[in-house]
Image: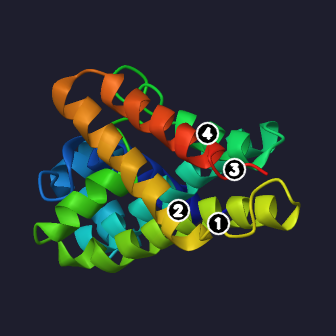
Amino acid sequence: MRKSEKTRRLIIAKSAELFNAKGYAGSSIQDVMDVTGLSKGAIYRTFAGKDDIAVEAFAYAGDLLMERFQEAADKATSAIDKVIAVCEVHRDPVGDPPLEGGCPLLNTAVEADDGYAALREPALAAFDRFVALVRSILDKGVQDGELRSDMETEPIASFVVTSLEGGVMASRLTRDNKHVQFAIRQIGLMLSAYKR
C-alpha cells in the first residue's frame, strides 16, 4: 500500500472516531491534526477540506456498524432472532456503544438535520441501508414460511430501526440503558405476533 493511501486511511479512521464523539461542527482541522498526528499540509494534500473528510469518515463508520449488524445477524438462525441480534448491537449505548461516541447514524442524522448539509444525503442513505437490512431479514422469514405472509415488511423494518434509534437516543440522553432495552423488548414482542 502506498504512503498516500495509508495517510488517507489514517485520516478517515481517526476522523470517524473524532466526529462520532465530538460532532462534525464541533471538530476542526486542528482536531483532525491532533488525532492523526499529521500536519495541516498532509491533510490538505489528501482532502480538499473538512466536509470531504466528514463524508468519507461517516461512510467508514457506517460500514463498520453495518459489519457489526451483519455479523450479529449471521450468528442467529430465525428471522426474529436475527432482527433482535441486530438490535442487540446497541444493547449498551451508555457504557459500550458499538463505535466510540455512539451510533454514527443517530449522531450524524441529528447533526445533518441541524444544518450540516454535507452529511444529510449520506445519513439518509445510511438510514435506508439499515432499513433495507432489517427488511431483507423479514422478507426471508416470510419467504421461508417462518413469518406470516401478511406481514408488511417495509413499515415494520422502518418501525424497528426508528424505535431502536429512539431508544439509543433516550438511553444516551438519560445515561440509562433501560430505554433501548424497552425498545428491543417491544420489537421482539411485535415480531412474535407475526410468527406462523
Q: CA distance from mark 1 to mark 3?
A: 22 Å
Q: Tell me, yes or no, whether the two marked residues, 2 and 1, touch with CB atoms within 8 Å.
A: yes
Disc 1 residue crowd, few under 14, some 14–19, many 20+, Cα 10 Å: some
Q: Which residue is mark 3?
A: 70
The amino acid pointed to by label 4 is Ile
Disc 3 residue crowd, few under 14, some 14–19, many 20+, Cα 10 Å: some
Earlier-in-chain disc, 1 versus 4:
4
Give the answer, above or below, for where 65 lies relative to 171.
below
The amino acid pointed to by label 3 is Gln
**Rendered-image quadrant of the N terminus:** bottom right
Secondary structure category for the residue under label 3: helix
Q: Nearer the viewer, residue 115 or 2?
A: 115
The amino acid pointed to by label 2 is Ile
**Mark sitting on residue 156:** 2
Q: Which residue is mark 1?
A: 151
Earlier-in-chain disc, 2 versus 3:
3
